[in-house]
Amino acid sequence: MAIDKGHRFGIDFDDAFPQGLVMVGEVSPDNEYQSREDRAANRPVRQRVDEVTGKRQWKVMVTDPAETRAKRASFEITLLADVQPVPTTSEALPGMRPIELDGLTAEPRVAGQGEFKYQSYVFRATGFKQAASKASRSGETAKAA
């Protein structure tokens, strides 16, 4: 059985990011490249549309506290939605908030250059869900038992 290039695997948020994610900055539209000539001609900026779902693409910078390599700890995640997704949590520090993603998918790809290539993933999500702290989750499990 062959898996097509660009296949997106559905993945549970807790499996992909056991310590959660921290959003840095704000959600912004993922716009197509606009050349100098396009800007000079006053052509409108166009937001990218996902070829699979047909939804608009938004981007957000996140940091994974579980990642040990500093260069791989921060990366962009693409959010697929008709309207701009709004985080459900408050800021822990100015410009930083813990988040959980809903409808998470992972697409494998090769990253790096030359002999320094490594397995990486393109993560996409449909939006945010209410983030619960790990301590409260373990407390809820203990109460239920």
Image (cartoon, helix red, strand yellow):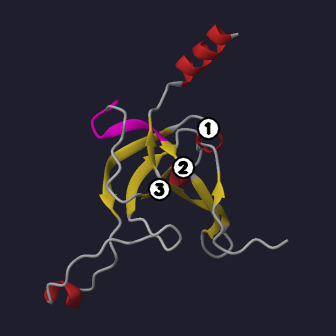
Query: Disc 2 versus disc 1: distance between alpha carbons?
Result: 12 Å
Magenta span of residues: 91-100
Residue at image mark 1? 14
Looking at the picture, how far across and down is residue 41, in whole percent? 15, 90
Looking at the picture, how far across and down is residue 46, in whole percent? 29, 75
The residue type indicated by label 2 comes to: Gly
Which mark sits nearer the N-terminus, 3 or 2? 3
Return the residue nearer the eye: 83 or 9. 83
Say if mark 3 contacts mark 2, CB within 8 Å: no
Return the residue nearer the eye: 128 or 109. 128
In the image, residue 40 sits, relative to residue 98, either above or below, namely: below
Looking at the picture, how far across and down is residue 74, in whole percent? 47, 51
**Corner quadrant of residue 97:** top left
Say if mark 2 contacts mark 1, CB within 8 Å: no
Residue at image mark 3? 77
Q: For mark 3, give the secondary structure.
A: strand
Q: Residue at x 49, y 74 (%)?
A: 51
Query: Disc 3 versus disc 1: distance between alpha carbons?
Result: 16 Å
**Corner quadrant of residue 2:** bottom right
Query: Disc 3 versus disc 2: distance between alpha carbons?
Result: 12 Å
Q: For mark 1, give the secondary structure.
A: helix
Q: Which mark is residue 103?
A: 2
Q: Residue furthest right?
A: 1
> Position of 122 compared to 93: left or right?
right
Label 3 or label 2, whichever lies nearer to me, is 2
